[in-house]
Each structure stands twice: as C-alpha cells, then as structure tokens.
Image (cartoon, helix red, strand yellow):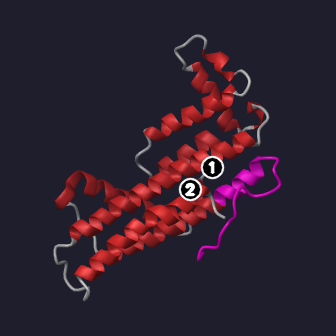
C-alpha cells in the first residue's frame, strides 16, 4: 500500500472535493453559464488545498518516523536531520536542554521540533515545500519529481490565497478549473509519495521501500 498519508488523502480528503464537483454538476447540468455557483468551486479549492497541505505535513512526519526507526543513534540520520536536532537543543532556553538527548530522547526532540514547525507551515508552494523537506530530512528539490512542474502547484495555492483574502471578490473559479486542480494535485501526491519512498530506501540500511510505489494512473 502507499504511505498512510497518501491513503488518507485519497480515501478521506479527496472525496469531499469530488462531492463539491458533483454538487456543481447537479445544480448546473448543462454546464452553461456561472449560475452564481462560485461559492461551490471556491469551497472546493479551499478543501483541496487543505488536503494537499495536510498530506505534506503528515507524509513528512511519516518520513521522519521511518528514519528514526531505522536509526540506532542520531549519527544514522541524514545530516540535515542531525543539524535540526542540534539546533533545537542549542536554542533551548533551558540550560538543561542537552539532557533531553539522553537515551532515545533525541527522537522525541526531533519529532516535537518538526511538529512545532508544521504548526506554522501554511503556504504549500514549491519553494516552501522544497525548503521544508530538505531542512528536516535532507531531501533536496522534492518538486523536481513533479511531472506537471511547480507552476501549477503555485498557481493553485495562490488561487486559494486569493479566495481566503478576497472572498466573493476573488477571481471566479470554473468547475473545469477546479477539476483540473484536483487531477494535478492528485498526480503530484502520487509522485511525491513515490519520490519519498525512493529517498528513504536510499537513506536507510533497510533494503526495501517504506511503502509501495504506484504508477501515475493508480
């Protein structure tokens, strides 16, 4: 099976977006005219972006958990992860902070630090995504694995931002456009999942993938 994060995206998050598309079709079966249904498509964009952001956050935590399970000590982690742990302890205002690393405490320090970072992650564009994954697990240029490229993702997140800040004054989103976003985001989630599976296999001593990779049409 794919990552737990992708399974959740596909089975729990994406159906809500599909339901919005179906509702739009039922209210406008001919597909002609806007019929004041922008609230449905805009709502669909918001739901889809929430699903995309949640997938990224949860799959990064899933990756971190896999790296930790395969590591006997912090030295077995990617250099970027080691630096994060060291930085968290260095910046701890508690002078006894280094004691947290004792035993398997470094695992808790790493995961808690990552969760805190993800609480402030709210703009899932390519640049922010690349920086996040590189700085925490050492995966460089994650967006390079996206077949459709980074531009469509950035356009999609910008559309979400415009809706969030301008509401009814935001640019109208057609049903076709929402469906295009749905397809592109779904494809990008699959590609991200496969890319991270390859990376984790390479970065650990475990001679198998952490989850099953899928073909794009799966």
Looking at the picture, tell me which residue is in the foreground, 202 or 51. 51
Q: Is residue 136 left or right of residue 163?
A: right
Q: Which residue appears at 64% of the width and 48% of the height?
A: 63
In x, y percent, where is residue 203?
Answer: 75, 47
Q: Is residue 113 visible?
A: yes
Q: Is disc 2 surrounded by few (<14), some (14 to 19) or many (20+) residues within 10 Å?
A: some
**Circle 2: element type:** helix
Q: Main secondary structure of the magenta part?
A: loop
Residue 216: quadrant of the picture: bottom right
Horizontal and vertical percent position of residue 68? 70, 39
Crowd around label 1: few <14 · some 14–19 · many ≥20 (10 Å):
some
- Give the secondary structure at mark 1: loop
Q: Relative to 25, is 218 on the left or the right?
A: right
First reached walking from the N terminus: tag 2 or tag 1? 2
Residue at position x 44%, y 39% from top? 119
Q: Is 201 part of what is drawn in magenta?
A: yes
**Percent position of residue 133, x then y:** 58, 46
Residue, x 64% and y 25% (percent of image)? 86
Q: Which residue is mark 1?
A: 140
The residue where tag 2 is placed is 5
Question: What span is colored magenta in the figure?
Answer: 195-218
């Amino acid at each position: 099976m794919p990552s737990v994060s992708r399974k959740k995206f596909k089975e729990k998050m994406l159906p809500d977006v599909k339901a919005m598309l179906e509702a739009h079709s039922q209210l406008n079966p001919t597909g002609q005219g806007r019929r004041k249904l922008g609230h449905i498509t805009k709502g669909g964009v918001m739901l889809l972006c929430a699903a995309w952001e949640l997938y990224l956050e949860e799959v990064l935590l899933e990756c971190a958990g896999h790296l930790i399970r395969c590591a006997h000590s912090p030295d077995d982690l990617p250099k970027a992860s080691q630096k994060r742990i060291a930085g968290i302890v260095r910046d701890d205002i508690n002078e006894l902070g280094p004691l947290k690393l004792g035993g398997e405490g470094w695992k808790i320090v790493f995961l808690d630090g990552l969760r805190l970072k993800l609480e402030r992650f709210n703009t899932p564009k390519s640049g922010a995504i690349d920086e996040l994954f590189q700085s925490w697990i050492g995966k460089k240029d994650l967006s390079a694995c996206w077949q459709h490229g980074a531009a469509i993702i950035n356009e999609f997140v910008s559309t979400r931002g415009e809706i969030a800040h301008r509401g009814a004054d935001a640019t109208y989103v057609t049903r076709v456009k929402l469906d295009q976003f749905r397809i592109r985001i779904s494809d990008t989630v699959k590609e991200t999942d496969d890319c991270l599976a390859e990376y984790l296999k390479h970065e650990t001593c475990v001679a198998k993938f952490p989850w099953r990779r899928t073909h794009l049409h799966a």
